[in-house]
Image (cartoon, rainbow, N blue to C red):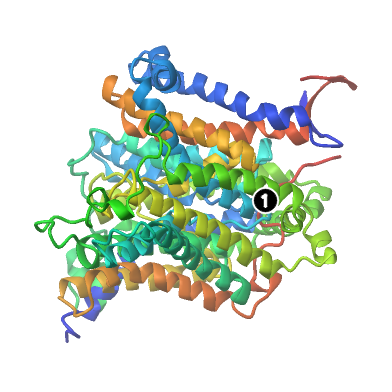
Amino acid sequence: MDIGGINPVILIATLMASAVPILMAALGETVVERSGVLNLGVEGMMVVGALGGFVIAVATGSPVLGFVGGAVAGALLSLIFALLTQVFLANQVATGLALTMFGLGVSSLGGQGYNGIKPPPTGQLLPDALADLPVVGPILFGHDWMVYFSILMTAILWWVLKTTRLGLIIRAVGESHEAAHALGYKVNRIRLMCIAFGGAMAGMGGAYISLVRVPQWVDGITAGAGWIALAIVVFASWKPWRVLIGAYLFGGITVLQLNLQVAGSAIPVEYLSMAPYLITIIVLVIMSAGKRGKANGAPAALGQNFHASR
Amino acid sequence: MLRLEKRPTPSRFWLYATPPVAVILTMIVGGILFALMGKNPFEVIRTIFWDPIFGEFAFYLRGQLLVKAGPLILIAIGLALGFRAGIWNIGAEGQYIMGAIVGASVGLAVFPTDNRLIFPVMVVAGAFGGWAWAMIPAILKTRFNTNEILVSLMLVYVAETILAKASTGFLKNPEGMGFPGSRNFSSFPAAQNSFLYEPLGLHWGGVAALVTGILAYILLTRHQAGFQIRLAGQAPRAARFHGVNPARLVVMCMGISGALAGMAGLFEVTGPAGQISIDFNSGYGFTAIIVAFLGRLNPLGIVLAGFLMALTYVGGEMASTNLGLPDAAIQVFQGMLLFFLLAVDVLTNYRFRLSVGGAVKGAK
């Protein structure tokens, strides 16, 4: 049942795994942007999380602790962003760019001496009896725990943002910080916590690249995944389930493009490897075309700093 | 308790004091970082900031300063025009690459001509390449309201794959014995961007950078278009009543920054880099963002900031060969500089107030 040298069941199973890093990072950024903060430092937080996760996993021999380490590393880096934008009221776009450059530098500095080391493997979660079932086995049961965790996080964030009081507060802060402040909510403190959450999610996503996808440490290992995560948040109109769809579509394109390269397609390798970026641009154009202003679902206070004058 | 209070008008003192304060803070924290890495912080700081200008090899390194500062200044001035108007072109790296490829292609197409006129034609072609690459996000922004930050950045990755294709495919040196990379411009004198005055490291790129700095200053302070840029950034609503066409502003700012980045790429590839190769671009397009902010988005400030950033490059290379400091440490150092700049900048628009038991006393 191969189509053009590519098995569709394997393709779906691999795309779910390859989407995990951008899915995690994009989910975190969704919460950050819903609270009215535009953090362009996703790439930096991911790469620092990738290194943090790798170092902890190698040191402890436990991949699970590695993911925790990645989350902590990403959150710590995001606190620099939070300090600058929420306390010192710095421009969010500029600070986010600085965070990415700083994160790439820090990770490449801290990663020296980790090249060529194999991290402890992250195994399949469910027993082989389930994963070996035809068709549904590889797609539904053949994954490691992070794949299920990322789907679970999508569901949790959807539930929190849509139905809970906490979600309402986050959205209020992101839609109108003046009104939220007048109601007595600590706008900057809530945003700070959202930023740290976004950093932890991006860090875990990054750790998945260095611990599972690659799996080893290379400088600049994220290769633009953080920017794609930012694009997916726009694509998804700031809604968690659509983030999942976007990440899977993107994961599918990446896997397909790699498979086509391996299968020896007639399309030159260079054009295949630029396809994910071109398709992201096309999707962004389609999503934003015809929707002027705020109608595309962007939080109203996105990118604006808040200073309580009273 | 310390709290922030908005100033009635931005402080002129802090507007100019912010960059030096940020540099000093970066030196202190960077020094601590270098000490943690087991290096003598004073020696490293001296190697980076003092030796290139006054040290033993300064006669050579002083020239290197302008070589590195030229492209940074050229790109940063273009970016600053857009940043002032709230237009975020962060894909200058891609425009830089495309300018280099288009300009070099024009030159290599007529290899081996002796006509010196080919060089200005290549400069125009380089500017055109960068301009065209920047027009993609600009047109998508004005036609479809697509986010220019994400599109311009995605195009950097696309440009990098085109660069890989150029150096291994359509621009590969036919006499290169199979090695990747184009013909070297040092063996193509008519199209070469050679030094005009070697001790200062002055080539046509440096001339262009300094002239652009002055022209951009005049544009911003004396010209209608510059007024519109500043107005659109500071008061978008007022700008609309004034009759500023936002779409035209986007196309203009993106176009200027793309053309300048493309020119910088052409000067680099025909001069210091020598040829199109997979990694001839050294991240100037991204570092220029730091330069633009360090120069307070002011063209004359950017010229100074470009030299300062060039100093960290040249000195950083010295520190890496003489003291074994990793290159990544310089990257961290540059990132920290931007952080401190953004943090100290709060003092331009706000002041800290120390309130003790109801009585409010001024602090700082």
User: Is residue B273 at least partly visible in the picture?
Assistant: yes
Could you say which quadrant of the image residue B52 lies in? Answer: top left
Question: Disc 1 designates what residue?
Answer: B84
Residue in the foreground of this view, choosing between B14 and A98: B14
Q: Position of residue A171 (x, y in %)?
A: 68, 59
Q: How many marks?
A: 1
Q: Amino acid at mark 1?
A: Arg
Residue nearest the observer in this picture, B92 or A167: B92
Of all chains, the one bearing label 1 is: B
Query: In the picture, residue B95 is in which quadrant?
Result: bottom left
Residue A199: image location, x then y, percent: 49, 46
Q: In the rendered view, does B358 fall on the left or right side of B111?
A: right
Position of B351 relative to A8 (above/below): above
Q: Is residue A304 above or below residue A57?
A: below
Q: Quadrant of residue B355?
A: top right
In the figure, B226 relative to B40: above or below? Answer: below
Q: Quadrant of the C terminus of chain B?
A: top right
Q: Residue drawn 45% across and 68% down?
A: A244
Could you tell me which secondary element the residue under label 1 belongs to? helix
Depth check, front residue: A31 or B100: B100
Quadrant where the N terminus of chain B is found in the figure: top right
Look at 77% across and 55% down and name the residue there.
B231
x, y percent for residue B339: 56, 35
